[in-house]
Amino acid sequence: MDESGQHTGGLHFIVGVVTVPNAAHDDVLQTVADIEAETRKRKKWGKTQEAVNLAYMRLILAQPEFKGWLHFGLFREVEMKRQADLRMKADVVAAIARTFDAARITVFLDGDQKRPAEVIGAMLRAMGVKVEKVRTIRREDTNAFARLADAICGLTRDAETQGEARDLFNQARRKKILIDTREA
């Protein structure tokens, strides 16, 4: 899971989530790593050239195994009070968790602080989500799934203003590869 928009003062806040069943984890991670190697994308969306970002997302969105596993939550004009970002992350994960038949889920957050993971875990449990654990990924650049979640946020944000990103985003939505959590 990754987020974008904290710097906008609540104008928009985006949460990107990659959901992968445990049985498929290693194969899907390898697919993402192969696509990163092919497109030479190894950094966050904002630190990568637009052409590389779009080539990466085109290949990701062309993978049939990702259908229904890539999610975003877009919040507009929200009041960014204390822990509001954590609440929005928990809301997105809870919406997704309700669509899966998993006995328990494991959540990976970007960041290096333990406290947000504990808070989100408690929020999810209070919403009735069966949480195995909530862990943080200390360095996003070392985890392909974290970079993919960041790319989901970047594509969602860029779809508002950039034609090619908008076309790719809308196509992925129509094919139900990229799911808005409000529709989950």
Image: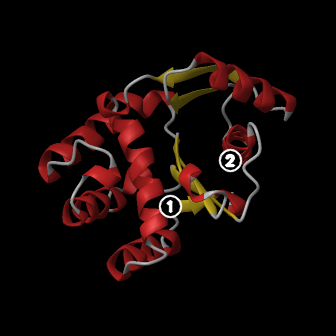
Q: Secondary structure at mark 2?
A: helix
In the image shown, does 151 or 94 lie closer to the viewer? 151
Q: Residue at x 58, y 49 (%)?
A: 6
Is 48 drawn above or below residue 134 in the view shown? below
Instruction: Name the residue carrying label 1.
Output: 178
In the image shown, does 121 or 138 lie closer to the viewer? 138
Horizontal side of 52 relative to 21 (left or right) equals left
Q: Give coordinates of residue 21: x percent, y percent.
A: 51, 34
Rendering quarter of residue 127: top right
Near mark 1 (Cα within 10 A), the count class, few <14, some 14-19 or many ≥20, is many
Q: Secondary structure at mark 1?
A: strand
Tell me the distance, in whole angstroms, between the alpha carbons under discs 2 and 1.
14 Å
Mark nearer the viewer, 2 or 1: 2
Q: Which mark is residue 57?
A: none
Amino acid at pointer 2? Val
Horizontal side of 114 relative to 174 (left or right) equals right
Is 65 drawn above or below residue 130 in the view shown? below
Near mark 2 (Cα within 10 A), the count class, few <14, some 14-19 or many ≥20, is many
Q: Give coordinates of residue 122: x percent, y percent.
A: 78, 24
Instruction: Name the residue carrying label 2.
Output: 92
Is 30 drawn above or below residue 70 in the view shown? above
Q: Residue at x 71, y 65 (%)?
A: 77
Amino acid at pointer 1? Leu
Q: Looking at the image, is mark 2 or mark 1 earlier in the sequence?
A: 2
Q: Residue at x 13, y 50 (%)?
A: 38
